[in-house]
Image (tube, grey):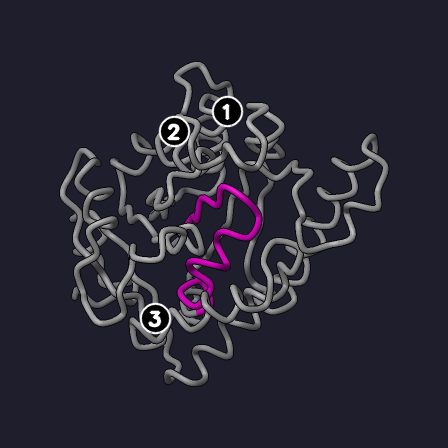
Amino acid sequence: MHILVLSPHRNDAAFSLGLAIESWLAAKHRVTVLGVFTRSATAPFSDAETVHPNDLLSYVSGMRRKEDGELLKLLPKLRMEDLNLKDAPIRLRCGTDGEFTVAPAADDSAVVKIQKALAKLDAEMKIDAVLLPLGLGHHVDHLVARNAALDFGATRACAFYEDLPDALRNGDAFDTDRDTDPAVHDEVASLSQTYTPVLLKSGHDAENGIKRKLKMVSVYASQIDEPTMQTISNFATRYGAGERVWANETWVADGRLTSVTI
C-alpha cells in the first residue's frame, strides 16, 4: 500500500514517525513524505547567523534540503516530495516567537496549495493511507497543514501523529508514568471524528530503537540541540521503541499497517 506522511517542515516526519516509516518500508509499503513549508530562514543550531540577510533564505533552505538528503541515506527507499512553501516566520511575518501563538488564517494561500498537492499525488500514485500532524504545541504551520488535509484524510485510512518536540514544549504535556495526556486528548477531541490510539511497532528492542531514532533525528542538526535530540529519541521508550498515532476506523481495520491498538 502507499502511505503518505504530511510533514509541515522537513524534520517533522523523522522526529515523530521515523521508526514507523522505517518499519513500513521494511514491510514493502511505499512511503512518501510531503514536506510543506520547506522554504525557511530558521536554523538556530547552525552557522546561519554568519550569512548576509539577503542570502539567508536560500542558504538555510539549502541546508535543510541537504538534511533531508542525509535521512534518505538512512531510508533509501523513502520518497520525498517538496511543496516549497514559505514557513510561518516568513509567510506570516510572525517571527519565531509567534509561531506557537498566531492562529491559522482562513485566507492563508497555503491551504489551497496543500490541497492541490494532495490531489495531484493521489491522482499520480493512489494514496491508501495518510498521516497528519496532530498539532500538539499549536505551531501554526502544523495546524494549517493538518486542517488543509482533513477532508483528504476522511476518505481513506488516516491517523494523526504526536508532534515532536512541540508536544514537549510545556513540560507537562506528556508524563512517562501515565497513559492519559490531557493535552493530547484535548487536541484529539477537537477533531470532527473519533480516533483510536494506535501503537506503531518498530521491531527494535528499547535500546536499539532509541539508537536508531537518534540516528534519524540527528541528521536535522540545524533545528535542535543534542539534549533535545536525545529527548526525542528517548521518547520512543514510552511506547516500547514505537510511536503512537490517533487513527480513524478505516486505519484500525486495515491489518497491513503493522499497528496494535492500545
Q: Amino acid at mark 3?
A: Gly
Q: Which residue is mark 1?
A: 110
Q: Which residue is mark 3?
A: 242
Q: Which residue is mark 2?
A: 148
User: What is the quadrant of residue 36 in the picture?
Assistant: top right
Secondary structure state at the residue bearing disc 2: helix
Image quarter hosting the C terminus? bottom left
Image quarter hosting the N terminus? bottom left
What is the span of residues highlighted in magenta in the rendered image?
3-22
Q: Do the residues bearing badges 1 and 2 touch, measured as CB atoms within 8 Å?
A: yes
Residue at the image point whose x is 38% and y is 29% from the top: 148
Secondary structure state at the residue bearing disc 1: helix
Residue at the image point whose x is 40% and y is 65% from the top: 20
Q: CA distance from mark 3 to mark 2?
A: 27 Å
Q: Position of residue 166 (x, y in %)?
A: 42, 50
Q: Amino acid at mark 1?
A: Ala
